[in-house]
Image: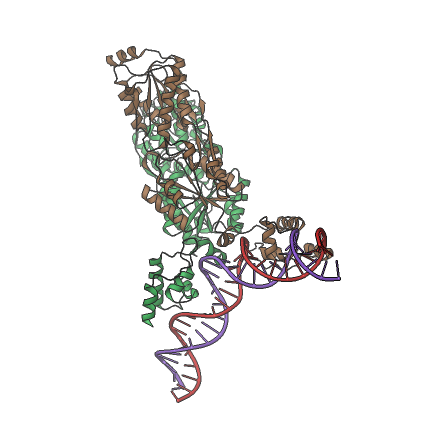
Chain colours: A brown, B green, C purple, D red
DNA sequence: CCTGTTGCCGAAACCGGTTTCGGGGAAAAT
DNA sequence: ATTTTCCCCGAAACCGGTTTCGGCAACAGG
């Protein structure tokens, strides 16, 4: 009996019916001298397989290089071992410098689990829904990674309703306590960064600190604004609605916002930005006004875009580890697909301060700054 | 007979055995009152199906929203209707601003054909081969899009040997006449842009024009350098090896190269760059030397990175339509997978000049420039 | 010694498609 | 009228897996 086993295992000349050079489960079963159902169950952890045969199957599978085809499995199981990422392309960020790192992180961990990543793109909200539906209907993926969450996110609503696994990069439903929410997410604590930025400026001696936020639809906009306010409280500074700008995503919008702030009778000597691009726009506006970044006006950004390093002076900002985000999201999603409860799959991380030279002690008080601006 | 047909077609209460809500080929066949083999052949253009039944099948399929599952087809046909893109992540461009647009183009046309795109990442050349092998072995894609081709590209060699369809973004095997090559590609005529850049500078009055090229491994490096030389000939300017720099990909490397050029006894008054990032580095170097971009020294880049627009003065450069590249490559690949010969699937396109203010008539002659540099 | 469990595995059905093969019926040829 | 041919289509095998079901041993209990 055991002789036969050994014989069949070492026999090289078995006529492996080859399917394009691949070893199939039939080949493996024939080679082992057992039925393919046993092989299948052995590989999938069924309890009615003895430990010894399980090991034999595993080792022989490895030796022959057998790996089941995910799409052959999918026809029965309905699962294709693939994650999907659908990118929405709107104008303000047609160029996303972080995409490559994000993909890297997601792909690496996905392929570590034996999964793959399929990406798709959408042009609008409506298109996004269509693309998601199509991917679901055609079973192209077992779950979705949703970047850039909105406060009230139609993608999340649809996927939740259809009961399709998904993870979000960023929280959602701002205002609802997390305990009452139902999704899983990975997010960076932008609010903590905003708070830290304010206390940093206050520590440098700034008394009037401005804020340039993003558009209201995104969830992070609200969190970061609150983080900014929390920073004011922590620093013992008064809140002034005049110092708050909203809805700036591009360089040009950032420049406009800063021009508005500088036109105040008591302009801010330091400005915190919810994102980097508007902060880079501030360089343009301040340059036009004859003000120096880091001296007359201090700037602190958030994101860590590559341009921040090369601006002059370099922009002090909070770097986001996008690669890690992709990696964590992929793992959370796979675990969710494997059955873990979404509510238990939530993770946050902190952005990392990168000190450069766009911030420093205020050279002038707010009143002196106003006077200087008056003269020009 | 026809009454039965009509009856069965309009009958709503047929117990469609549902597979997760999807309409399967069995449902469709039952609904039509014919066998599933007929339905299958009708949908796949077999000639032994009458035109009338083909139309009935097609229209009913559309009405019921039937679409075959690609992975169910794949188990028999071996094709999954998916394209693969494997990104190599090396340091110099961890941030690729064009990736999003490229993906957009590829995804859009792929999904227009009913295909999808799976992306993967590799950390090194060796890793790249492993990733490709895995995707091939596990039948995750029917063909590959290879970005950033090298002169002697190991990916191409492997895929060609294994007879796997692939298209290249960029040509390869520099020096071998296209007629003797065997792959398919889409490429931008960077050499034409380089040539145009030189004649443009010459037209503005520049006599000594420098060149900053990229690393030798890439195929485009050689083409663009030759394009530059062709431009010199066309403008009737002499070739001077001292004015040629190589191997610059980053901002810092570009700055170094320009510092070298400016240290020449007769420095160039205009410089052409194979890529934008080194050109942006030139701003730093020239700034440090007290020279003004666009006056003392003219610069022309290539790529159209977003930073080019925001540099001061704006960088004159050649924009590449990356989205179109992705779109064309996806189509070429699908056609190749469907059987068209690779040699017939080649396309080129031209980069588009974007005139900004980094170039102009030389304020000083080369000698005067050298004198000015001497004094500092 | 007989009966119930229990552990372990093979046979067969199944998933949703594709493809081969053979045959029925109508039109064309004899 | 019979035979041949051609046009269509259905039955069944097949692709590479998973899952259900039933049964054979070995072992425990009576």
Q: Quadrant of the C terminus of chain B?
A: top left
Q: Quadrant of residue A370?
A: top left
Name the one closer to the observer, B100 or A329: A329
**How far across and down, in percent of the image, does residue B30 sit?**
40, 64
- Up/down of A244 relative to B356, above or below: above
**How far across and down, in percent of the image, does residue D19 sit?**
54, 54
Q: Quadrant of residue B286?
A: top left
Q: Residue at x 67, y 49 (%)?
A: A52
Q: Quadrant of the N terminus of chain B?
A: bottom left
| B350 lies left or right of B150 | left
**How far across and down, in percent of the image, does residue B267 sit?**
39, 24
Query: Is residue A125 at all visible to an observer of this figure?
Result: yes
| B280 lies left or right of D12 | left
Q: Quadrant of residue B370?
A: top left
Q: Residue at x 33, y 67 (%)?
A: B7
| B174 lies left or right of A301 | right
């Amino acid at each position: 009996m055991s002789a036969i086993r050994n014989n069949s295992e070492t026999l090289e000349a078995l006529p492996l019916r080859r399917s394009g050079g691949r070893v199939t489960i039939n080949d493996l079963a024939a080679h082992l001298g057992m039925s393919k159902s046993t092989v299948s169950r052995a590989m999938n952890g069924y309890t009615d397989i003895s430990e010894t045969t399980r090991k034999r199957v595993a080792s022989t599978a490895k030796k022959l290089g057998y790996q089941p085809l995910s799409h052959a499995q999918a026809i029965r199981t309905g699962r294709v071992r693939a994650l999907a990422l659908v990118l929405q392309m709107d104008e303000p960020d047609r160029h996303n410098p972080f995409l490559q790192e994000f993909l890297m992180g997601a792909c690496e961990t996905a392929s570590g689990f034996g999964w793959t990543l399929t990406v798709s793109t959408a042009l609008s909200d409506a298109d996004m829904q269509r693309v998601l539906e199509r991917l679901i209907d055609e079973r192209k993926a077992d779950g979705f990674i949703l970047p850039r969450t909105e406060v009230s996110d139609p993608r999340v609503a649809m996927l939740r309703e259809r009961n399709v696994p998904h993870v979000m990069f960023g929280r959602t439903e701002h205002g609802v306590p997390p305990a009452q929410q139902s999704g899983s997410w990975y997010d960076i604590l932008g609010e903590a960064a905003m708070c830290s930025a304010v206390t940093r400026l206050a520590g440098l001696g700034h008394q009037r600190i401005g804020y340039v936020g993003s558009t209201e639809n995104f969830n992070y906009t609200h969190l970061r604004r609150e983080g900014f306010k929390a920073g004011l409280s922590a620093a013992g500074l008064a809140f002034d609605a005049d110092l708050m700008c909203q809805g700036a995503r591009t360089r040009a919008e950032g420049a406009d916002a800063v021009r508005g702030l500088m036109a105040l009778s008591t302009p801010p000597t330091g400005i915190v930005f919810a994102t980097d691009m508007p902060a880079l726009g501030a360089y343009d506006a301040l340059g036009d006004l004859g003000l120096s970044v880091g001296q007359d006006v201090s700037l602190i950004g958030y994101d860590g875009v590559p341009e921040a390093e090369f601006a002059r002076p370099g922009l002090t900002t909070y770097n986001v580890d996008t690669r890690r985000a992709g990696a964590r999201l992929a793992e959370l999603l796979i675990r969710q697909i494997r059955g873990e409860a979404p509510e238990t799959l939530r993770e946050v991380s902190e952005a990392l301060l990168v000190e450069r030279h766009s911030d420093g002690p205020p050279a002038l008080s707010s009143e002196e700054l106003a006077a200087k601006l008056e003269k020009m």
